[in-house]
Amino acid sequence: MGPGLSAQTIWRWTAIVLVHLAVVLIWYIAVEVGEVPKFVLASPQETLLSLFDTYPWFHNTMVTTAEIFGGYFLAVVVGVGLALLFSWFRTVDTLLMPLVVSLNMIPKVALGPLIIVWFDYGIQTNIIIAFSISFLPILITTARGLREVEPDLIDLVRTLRATRRQIFVKIQLPGSLPYIFSGMKVAVVLAVAGAVVGEIIASDSGLAYLIGQVQVTLDTAAMMMAVILITLVGVALYLIVLGLERLVVVRDARVETV
Amino acid sequence: MTAQPASGGEPFIRLVGVKKVFRARREEFLAVSDATFDVNEGDLVSIVGPSGCGKTTLLKIVAGLFPHDGGTLEIGGAGSDFDPARDVGMVFQQPLLLKWRRVLENVLLPAEILGLPMGEARERARGLIDMVGLAGHEQKYPYELSGGMQQRAAIARSLVHDPRLILMDEPFGALDALTRERMNLELLRIWEQSRKTILFVTHGIAEAVFLGTRVVVLTAGPARMADRIDIDLPRPRTLDMKTHERFGAYARHIYHLLGVE
């Protein structure tokens, strides 16, 4: 696409904003017209106003953000790193890939309480939970991307006596980038879920922890605000990943996920 | 006439009774047998045959991708300076361009792998991109090009390290009929301009006759060489020649060898 904004891009962004505003509008009408009690469903304006209540919003948002971003960063490093090891050492791949597939079947949310037993509760523990839930898809898609090289292309560079290093640097690694990003996009949602699970099971701060706190007083507006803030942190991370993908991966090579 | 005998009368490539056996589980499968033919320097030799006749296998043996199990294969003649890494260019049915590289960068790939001086290689790559008819498309990504244009880029890539031998494995097999005809003419022009030796694998009988100075006919089940035919048609070849009586006779002979009547 050329410089500046095309009509198509402007229309797409307008549509995104309009759809979101429409949801808020429906929410507003439902609460006002339906006369829903405040403790069941707070209106949009009440939800927004809960930000001025005395809850430590900023601190909790920072804690949750740190957990999500920290766990996610670890997941990317470990997921991509392990996939590279798998591709460099066939024995490691043969031994560990079946294990990875089994591990992927574990409902990782159920590991939360165990991890808390092992590491005590706190930000670090929630980072580990977010990491453990989100790194497998990155590992699996990256490993697949590194494996997926056209055999004829390998023949072509073999006639030129390309070294393994050259094949890796010039063909395998750049070829796997779209897959890495496709795994990374899936992992964002999982990292958010991981941090929330950790906070809900046992913790002393964070937005999901706050939800548990205000549930006791039936402050529905604050609960909804917390959910919205968690979502916004996830959206921010997702947009960062999308932006990076745009920088690094040529349009045609991108793997569409969501 | 472009075809010229190599100095001293010795062929550039000589195959005598070349054979290849693949083993899968306990079964042996004869992929190539009794391949015996010469290729002179500067020739364009077509290898034609049905699927499973071993034509791709034969090409890969010449490329040095795997060893043969019998017979002799000599490239470059005795005491030659043929360097299997530097002197072979390949083109496949798929263009196999790297999606994340622009045309110019794709064409440069062999030069990078061989560690050639990049300044010169860049210069050469630009010249080749012009020659294959992609001038002005150097900075485009593969997805911005049509199938025929991608294959042109692949041909430029096969020439960038100035190899003496180009191996082509059904390079136009994935293109539509009309583009294929056009690419045949383009290939002849590129061949005459670059004066390379080309081995051209195809299952198109008309294509094999139209392009080749010589046609090697392989049959399947069992894989063996049925004939090698020198094509005595004037050059430069034009599409009109496809209606030529002699062209028809060559094609009919090959159809007969391949059991299609």
Image (cartoon, rainbow, N blue to C red):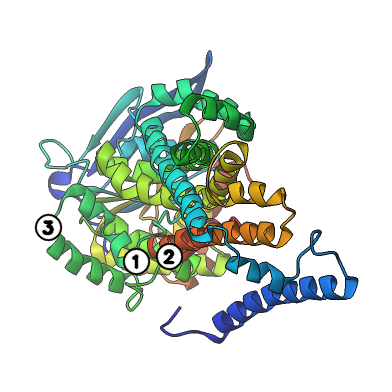
Q: Which residue is mark 2?
A: B142
**A245 sits to left or right of A228:** left
The residue lying toward the viewer, choosing from A208 and B125, is A208
Q: Residue furthest right?
A: A34
Tag 1 or tag 2, which sits nearer the N-term?
1
Q: Are marks 3 and 1 in contact (CB under 8 Å)?
A: no
Q: Judge whether A251 appears above or below A13 on screen.
A: above
Chain assignment, label 3:
B
Say if labels 2 and 1 share a chain: yes
Per the image, label 2 sits on a secondary structure element best described as helix
Residue that appears at 23% across and 34% down: B74
Q: Judge whether B76 appears above or below A232 on screen.
A: above
Residue that appears at 55% across and 38% down: A133
Label 2, label 1: how far apart the Cα atoms are: 7 Å
User: In x, y percent, where is residue B219?
Assistant: 52, 37
Tag 1 or tag 3, which sits nearer the N-term?
1
Q: Which mark is residue B117?
A: 3
Q: Are marks 3 and 2 in contact (CB under 8 Å)?
A: no
User: In x, y percent, where is residue A142?
Assistant: 46, 42
The residue lying toward the viewer, choosing from A39 and B158, is A39
Chain assignment, label 2:
B
Q: Amino acid at mark 2?
A: Pro
Q: Judge whether A110 appears above or below B121 on screen.
A: above
Q: Judge whether B131 appears above or below A55 on screen.
A: below
Say whether residue B246 is visible.
no
Neighbor class of circle 1 (other Cα within 10 Å; few <14, some 14-19, many 20+) is: many
Q: Are marks 2 and 1 in contact (CB under 8 Å)?
A: yes
Q: Amino acid at mark 3?
A: Pro
Q: Which residue is mark 1?
A: B103
Tag 2 or tag 3, which sits nearer the N-term?
3
Label 3, label 1: how far apart the Cα atoms are: 19 Å
**B247 sits to left or right of B136:** right
